[in-house]
Image (tube, rainbow, N blue to C red):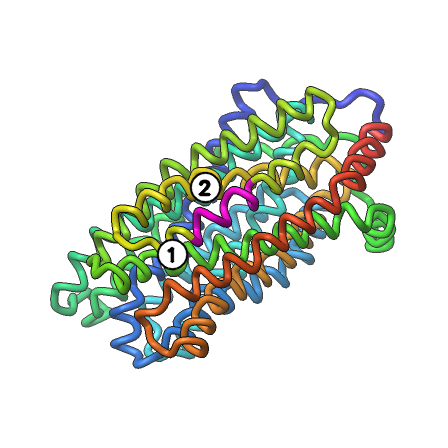
Amino acid sequence: MSSEPVRPASPTYAWYVVAVLLLAYTLSFIDRMILSLLVGPIKADLGISDTQMSLLMGFAFAIFYSALGIPLGWFADRRARKGLIVAGIAAWSLMTAACAFARGYVGLFLARVGVGVGEATLSPAAYSMLGDYFPREKLGRAMAVYSIGVPLGSGIALVAGSLVVKMVTEGPPVMLPLVGALEPWRLTFLWVGLPGLLVALLVALTVREPPRQGVAPTAGSGELIAFLKSHPAAIASHFGGMALVALVMYGAMAWIPQFLHRTYGMPVPQAGLWFGVATAACGAGGLLLGGWLADRLYRRGLKDAHLRVIRLNAVLLAPLFVGMALAPTAPVALGLMIVAMLVGTLHGGVAGAALQMITPNRLRARMVALYFLVANLIGLGLGPTAIALVTDLGFGRPEDLRYGLAIVTAVALPIAAIVLSVGLKPFARAVEAAEQNT
């Protein structure tokens, strides 16, 4: 064990790496979220239901994104993380472009699976790298800035996508050399997928692998299991609470444009524009606020600061999303949506930083991958489908999407708050143990 950690570079370069990784994360969410604005033309072209569409938005992506995170996390704990990130960006970008050529539901499903496989490489490796670039007292802010890729990418996808969708869905098929005629929605996947190859090149040429802090990365699977057993309540409360928060957030982000369209008659491009601006601006603000608050509470001696911020997120978000779903008019719904996207993203960077606070360096990437396995299988895999199933089976009319959104929120978020409350003291003890071993 090294007695004196060596920081890999200047603070300026460390923040540059954050910026590059943020760009990659933003791109990943553009590729991930563009599907929510193409619901109409894809359903019409392929003849599928809301539930089948929800599987494309959630389960198809999440299943391999989550499952492959564990072996990829193992690789990131033992080998250079930079190469893994470069390969992943190139892979998901090519698979997003491949969605343009899917000729049926199964083909599009498999292409979305491929997107998930590529994106599974990024966060375990990125979280691990940032844990080596930043000291503990600044990690919350660094993780929060990186996590801005979630609302920023989603917002760009929704804002730019709403303009692109309006343009391409109102036009005829486009003839491309060597390809032939492509429906406008297919062309959108090419436009958002191929630029990722340039981002992969940027990472390859300008990002350096940081030296690992603490113990050399030689831990086996037995040590990971031993660590999980050493802090079961802290880890279970973090994973469980975040999975339920993610279920609501991913479900809402997949369906809010359609909710505004079906409930208030708002055109989908206009709904996407409103939701995209709120997601990008307020979501980024919420992430920075959450990271700042967690770091501030931690410096004041609250070892459970990060879990407290996640719990605050769940408590504040529940009435806002339920109120938005049941709002009598579009202006009221939009107002509540804007506030919800601010407080609903407080958890974003804090959740990842919390794991870095309690996990030994040699296990960090695998812990992040395990967290994503749980949170994404439940959140991303089930969130969009849970809302669709409640709507389809409970009400039977697409126009009643608002009730599916309200019910899922009202059930999941109070349970999340309870789970996180139970874990506060165990999490504080886990942080203290990690500090003593640093």
Q: Amino acid at mark 2?
A: Gly
Image-based side of 226 in relation to 314, left or right: right
Q: Horizontal and vertical percent for residue 320?
A: 44, 47
The residue segment tinted magenta is 313-322
Q: From the image, which quarter does the C terminus lie in?
A: top right
Characterize the local packing of mark 2: few (<14), some (14-19) or many (20 or more) Cα atoms within 10 angstroms. Answer: many
Q: Horizontal and vertical percent for residue 296?
A: 62, 22
Magenta segment's dominant SS is helix
Residue 203 can be seen, yes or no: no
Asked if residue 315 lies in the magenta stretch, the reply is yes
Q: Residue at x 43, y 66 (%)?
A: 404
**Residue carrying label 1:** 325
Numbered mark located on residue 71 in the image: none
Q: Horizontal and vertical percent for residue 420?
A: 68, 46
Image-based side of 402 in relation to 71, left or right: left
**Which quadrant of the figure has residue 361?**
top right
The correct choice, above or below, for 241 with respect to 103 in the image is: above
Q: Residue at x 55, y 59 (%)?
A: 379
Q: Amino acid at mark 1?
A: Ala
Q: Horizontal and vertical percent for residue 368?
A: 66, 48
- Tag 2 secondary structure: helix
Depth check, front residue: 127 or 154: 154
Depth check, front residue: 434 or 424: 424
- Tag 1 secondary structure: helix
Q: Residue at x 62, y 47 (%)?
A: 124
**Residue carrying label 2:** 149
Front tag of 1 and 2: 1
